[in-house]
Amino acid sequence: MSAFLYGIGLQWKLDLRNKGIIITYYVVPLIFFAFMGGIFTSINPTAKDTLIQSMTVFGVMMGAILGTPTPLVELYRSEIKKAYKVGGIPLWLGVVNNAVSAFIHLFIMIMVIYFVAPIAFKATVPPNIVLHFLSVAIFIVVSLSVGTVLGLFVKDTSKLVMLSQLVFLPSIMLSGIMFPVELLPNALQTVGKIFPATWGYRLMKGDFNLINLLPLVIILLIMVVASGYKLTKIKAE
């Protein structure tokens, strides 16, 4: 257990020293929150009711999809992988350490949004705090699973940037955080349901039910199976 915690702590320190990770986990999400929070609430006063939820979705997707995969590419496509094998360290431990560290970073960023939004933009605080943060935790875990798959399957950072954007941008545009999904064509509404951002946003808005929870569970299971398969392939290489 101590070795496991040490690994998480080490990954945490490495993330803090990685400028790219800090930018995607903290800088861009919080700048977007500070900039767009004022715009959203000025254009549409009712946006205050879902400002915390929408900014949370953006921040989590930014960190999980654009930030989380990078350390995995660096780990499993470098000599570090050989060090894991020589030391008898399970390869899956790198995935777990990276995910737990990312979860902590993203949760800190979300807490900043949660406490600052009501003060800066008079945003409405979610009525049920327990369900809100439970929804947030579930959404982070599922989003990190998607980011993990990207990090395991993509072999170089240039391709990773492109593929991550292909997941991130539709997630933001089709989830409903920028404008109501009802304004989209039916085809795009259907495409939006592929991404966890759509279901996570619904959960955080207070619609915590099986209809919105089940798609997230399915996505998580698919990503876990895909990650396990890829780790097996990497181990055999």
Image (tube, grey):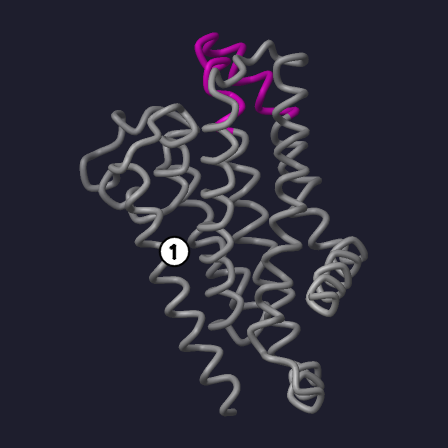
> In which quadrant is the N terminus drawn?
bottom right
Which stretch did the figure color magenta?
34-54
> What is the three-letter code of the residue carrying label 1?
Leu
Quarter of image, res 17: bottom right
**Residue 170 appears at what percent x and percent y?**
39, 45
Q: Main secondary structure of the magenta part?
A: helix
Instruction: Identify which residue is drawn at 45% across, 85% down.
Output: 233
Q: Is residue 97 left or right of residue 200?
A: right
- The answer to whether residue 71 is above or below residue 167 is below
Q: Is residue 128 left or right of residue 29?
A: left
For the view shown, which residue lies furthest in the left direction? 186
Instruction: Identify which residue is drawn at 43% across, 73% down.
Output: 228
Q: Provide the secondary structure element on which disc 1 rests.
A: helix
Does 39 lie within the magenta span? yes
Instruction: Identify which residue is drawn at 44% across, 50% down.
Output: 142
- The answer to whether residue 136 is above or below residue 84 is above
Is the residue marked by circle 1 packed among few (<14), some (14-19), or many (20+) residues within 10 Å?
Answer: many
Instruction: Identify which residue is drawn at 52% across, 68% down.
Output: 159
- The answer to whether residue 135 is above or below residue 221 is above
**Residue 148 appears at what percent x and percent y?**
51, 62
For the view shown, which residue lies furthest in the front direction? 1
Given residues 67 and 185, the one toward you in this image is 67
- The answer to whether residue 193 is above or below residue 20 is above
**Residue 4 appears at what percent x and percent y?**
69, 66
The residue singled out by tag 1 in the image is 220
Quarter of image, res 36: top right
Given residues 194 and 212, the one toward you in this image is 212
Does 172 lie within the magenta span? no
Q: Is residue 119 left or right of residue 96?
A: right
